[in-house]
Amino acid sequence: MEGIIAIWQRDMIKFFRDRARMIGSFSMPILFLVVFGVGMGGAMESLVASGIGTDEDFNYVEFIFPGIVSMTLLMTSVFSSLSVIQDRDFGYMREILVSPVSRVNIALGKMLGSASVAFVQGVMMFVLMPFLGISIDLVTLLQLLPVMFMIACAFSSLGLLVASLLNSMQGFQLVVNILVMPMIFLSGALFPLSNMPGWVDFIVTLNPVTYGVDLMKNIMIDVDNLSATVQEEMGLNLTFFGQPVTMTGEVFFLLGFTALLILLATLMFRRKN
């Protein structure tokens, strides 16, 4: 346990000391908010309204904000796992690999460190809510925080596995960019994924980010109070190969996904050693 805490604490100290990193990580989410929320918001709201065929109000910024937060969690947690390769290059990883700390504790410590960094970045996104005309109550926030940390852990385990398989920072950045951007765009984070071709639906179903985004939306948007037409038009009736997906099912899916990837990352650490 001490090994996990030490590795986690080191990653958190590095993050809070690097203010440029803290500020710079906001650039991409804010860019997406401006481009999609402000630039395309009016057009998307008109399209959705015409599809719904009613006068029911629809706020596109409110729809994409949970997706933007999920995107922040994904990008920050995955790219934070780059520290595994940096630590390997500078010798720190070699030191802890030959220490009595078990490989499982090393993987858990790195995962929790990356997840905590991503969680802090995700929480900081809520500072933008008053400027976007979005508000949430205290109960919703308390429900949201543990879900955000769980999602960050799932995405961090993905980054950890990729980092354990690669030997260079350049290769990691290339693979992650190729991997992360399709996962974001095919998750429903930025636009509805209804009425898509069958092969796209298949990828969306297998995409773990889909379930994190949907979980965030169900908490923040209060999907149950929307009409069935709006839910269908916005792709909020998520299914898993034809079966309706529940929030409980999404939680168990993400927990299982995290456990599997941590196991695989641990095996890779042993092989590297």
Image (cartoon, rainbow, N blue to C red):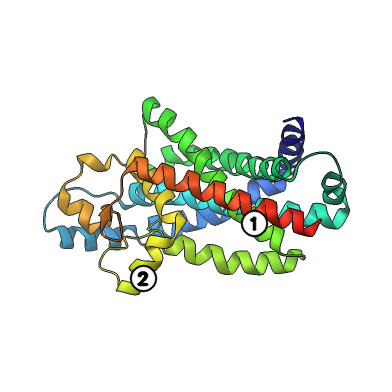
x, y percent for residue 110:
70, 44
Element on which disc 2 rests: helix
Element on which disc 1 rests: helix
Of the 4 image quadrants, the one containing the C terminus is bottom right
Label 1, residues with CA under 10 Å away: few <14, some 14-19, many ≥20: many
Q: Which residue is mark 2?
A: 200
Q: CA distance from mark 1 to mark 2?
A: 25 Å
Residue at point 46% right, 38% down?
A: 147
Amino acid carrying mark 1 in the image: Leu
Work out whether residue 85 or residue 36 is closer to the camera in this orientation and state it.
85
x, y percent for residue 209:
46, 55
Task: Identify whether 195 is placed above or below 107.
Answer: below
Please give left or right for residue 259 compared with residue 251 in the image. right
Amino acid carrying mark 2 in the image: Val
Work out whether residue 153 or residue 75 is closer to the camera in this orientation and state it.
153
**Which residue is at the far top?**
138
**Which residue is at the far left?**
54
Task: Identify whether 28 is placed above or below 123.
Answer: below
Please give left or right for residue 70 compared with residue 116 in the image. left
Q: Does residue 226 appear in the picture of this structure?
A: yes
Q: Any mark on residue 3, and which?
A: none
Using the rendered view, name the quadrant where residue 164 is placed. bottom right
Residue at point 38% right, 45% down?
A: 215
Q: Which label lies toward us, 1 or 2?
A: 1
Of the 4 image quadrants, the one containing the N terminus is top right
Total tally of numbered discs in the picture: 2
User: Which of the two labelled residues, at mark 1 and mark 2, occupies the earlier sequence position?
Assistant: 1
Work out whether residue 120 or residue 161 is closer to the camera in this orientation and state it.
161
Q: Which residue is mark 1?
A: 161
x, y percent for residue 202:
36, 67
